[in-house]
Amino acid sequence: MSARKITIEPVTRIEGHGRVTIHLNDEGKVDQTFFHVDEFRGLEKFCEGRPYFEMPQITQRICGICPVSHHLAAAKACDGVARVEPTRPAKLLRELIHMGQLIQSHGMHFFHLAAPDLVLGFDADPAIRNVVGIIRANPALALKAVNLRRYGQQIIERLGGKRIHPSFAVPGGVNAPLDPKDRDALLSEFDAMVEIAKVAVGIGKGWIESNQALVDSFASFPSNYMGLVDMEGGLQLYDGEIRIKDAEGRLVAQFKPEHYLSHVGEHVESWSFLKFPFYRKLGWPNGTYRVGPLGRMNVVDKIGTPLANEELKLFKGINGGRPVEGSLYYHYARLIELVYALERAGELLDDPDAMSSDIRTYPSAAKLPGQGVGVIEAPRGTLFHDYSTDEDGLLTRVNLIVATGNNNWAMHTAAGMVAKSFVDGNKLTEGMLNRVEAAIRCYDPCLSCATHAIGKMPLEVTLIAADGTVLDRISR
């Protein structure tokens, strides 16, 4: 047993509630670190017995930050249950609302959650190391950030009626066409939003260049990587096949989403309610992988829009064509995807089929029971929804593997590496612990998707001796 333990609860500037315990040896050095997710998510169980077609509305209540991801993954799973293929216009509109989700989520994470560390410094006073501090330090930049997130939310609202928890995707398609006035309004701001994304990319790359040694060593470790690709290996966020590459960049597997259970297993540890997914053929823990922006950039061969593809070429050159391993590179990868989401939204808005009223293929009740698997690339990574029903269309089994869950092992590993590099139990500082939190923030975890928590979340870090004596305490 370790002589002392440091607890970080909760990890701040993430979505949801997580806890880190850092176990020290008798010399005050870090021995082991654990990333705990303590809340229990019972969504799969309490959805049993519900009509399958309710799931696009039910599951997005998991989270208020990435509801569209669950909304669309659920709709795709419902397509499978009902054995219907949405029309091309419906798929375009689903992808468009998904791009809105990516724009608002990636924009919010970089400017509101990551930027306080990058712009103000890991050791800055926590009273100012937040979005308010960013506003004070650079009001013009803060205004750009707000406008970018607003634009993403506008896409969601103009299609789904609400910025959060929209009503839009249904089994077989969507429930409303795109209004020409809404299309024109979104296009009128498009160029300005792309310029803001370029500014964000410049900030991110500039910070990396100024802190290259830190970026290359900070929570940098080999792993497998997962993401959706098209048949040419191009980045896909709404649809595609699942590709896994290893730490050397070699292809490990590529398979259709509906076959995921043959490839993905889930490991359980006693210290977390969040499971640890892994690639079955490599076993646990050799088959663990990373998802999200870094995972996607490491598995794709190209991006189908010009500005993002040029950035991808630069990204691929960071490690000589091999996968990029440093966790802080998630921020750069996320900004590349932000550019892509904007460019792709522009393409979708310009597509004549996006204005079509042929937006739904209606399911036939005679085709039930059924099973459907919906997989989508949520902002935080690959998201799986898997439903089975009885002959009345009532759910008999629900399985979700959320994006953040896929990164559970990686966040645990990253926190441990940074703790060993920066935490000195004999002279505890808030900045040391913030670096541990920052390692987790690289992955932009949405623990609300995996858990549920309510109430205020203050932070108190207490250093306790083996006999229970309180040696030090920091609170905020």
Image (cartoon, rainbow, N blue to C red):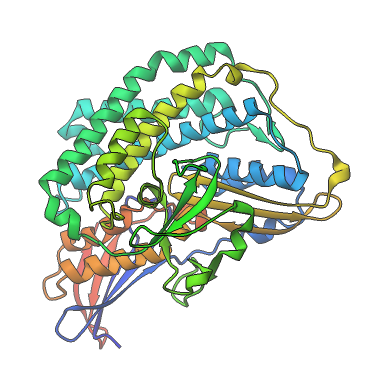
Residue 345: percent from the left, percent from the top? 46, 26
Residue 339 vertical placement versus 49 (above, below): above
Q: Residue at x 16, y 43 (%)?
A: 207
Picture quarter with the N terminus? bottom left
Residue at 57% over, 45% down: 70
The answer to whether 124 appears left or right of 83 in the picture is left
* Figure quadrant of residue 109: top left
Q: Quadrant of the C terminus?
A: bottom left
Which residue: 20% across, 40% down?
205
Residue at the location (29% across, 34% down)?
A: 310
Lateral position of residue 3 relative to residue 104, left or right: left
Which quadrant of the structure image shows residue 118?
top left
Quick check: can you spot residue 84?
yes
Picture layout, residue 324 above or below residue 141: below
What is the x, y in percent for residue 408?
A: 42, 63
Question: Residue 260 location in percent, x, y?
Answer: 59, 59
Q: Can you see residue 161?
A: no
Above or below residue 317? Residue 160 is: above
Residue farthest toward the right in the current orientation of the protein? 366
Relative vertical location of residue 269 with respect to residue 139 in this rendering, above or below: below
Q: Position of residue 176 (x, y in %)?
A: 66, 23
| Nearer to us in this view, 146 or 76 | 76
Which one is in front, 228 or 214?
A: 228
Count of numbered tags: 0
